[in-house]
Amino acid sequence: MIQLIVGSEGKGKTKHLLDKVNEEIKEASGNIVFLDRSTKHMFELNNRVRLINVTDYDFENKSEFVGFIYGIISQDHDIQKIYIDGIIKIARLDKAGFEELVKKFEGISDKFGIDIVVSASIDAGELSEDIKKHVIVAL
């Protein structure tokens, strides 16, 4: 399952994402991974959540980022959910690239049985109907 939290910058997407991960870790039977561009939210996350600072890795495009996601999955077969904050900046995407990545995540989610929750600085009105079905919060 893919879930999207979308809206313009500064609208509170990260807060929604942090609240969601901290609520879901209480009942999680598998591991949860949180990808962010810094470690500043480390103390806001439950200590059972694995925080990865993606700035330690130099992604040049979405293909490299997808490879990184596959690497995380290959190293931990108990991953239940992956949370990604600020996907557009992390993977260096434009709108078309974002939609392609969401479709790629659908396949990854289905194949490995992992839920992927993503925040993105994009307006829900700009998304195609195929992608809008994944939006759980639009700010």
Image (cartoon, grey):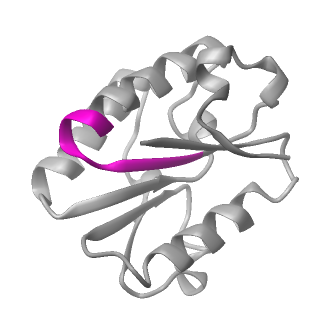
Q: Quadrant of residue 123?
A: top right
Q: Quadrant of the N terminus?
A: top left
Q: Is residue 106 one of those drawn in magenta?
A: no
Residue 43 drawn above or below residue 101: below
Residue drawn at x 44%, y 21% as measured from the top left: 103
Q: Position of residue 53 (x, y in %)?
A: 45, 61
Residue drawn at x 57%, y 23% as measured from the top left: 98
Image side of residue 122 versus residue 103, left or right = right
Image side of residue 126 versus residue 64, left or right = right
Q: Quadrant of residue 12?
A: bottom right
Q: Position of residue 48 (x, y in %)?
A: 36, 84
Q: Is residue 117 one of those drawn in magenta?
A: yes
Residue 36 drawn above or below residue 29: above
Closer to the camera, 30 or 55? 30
Residue 43 drawn above or below residue 31: below
Image side of residue 92 versus residue 34, left or right = right
First to last magenta residue range: 109-118
Q: In this orientation, does residue 61 appear?
A: no
Q: In this orientation, does residue 36 appear?
A: yes
Residue drawn at x 20%, y 49% as measured from the top left: 73
Q: How many marks?
A: 0
Residue drawn at x 24%, y 61% as measured from the top left: 79
Q: Position of residue 85 (x, y in %)?
A: 58, 52
Closer to the camera, 57 or 72? 72
Q: Quadrant of residue 95?
A: top right
Q: Position of residue 104 (x, y in %)?
A: 37, 23
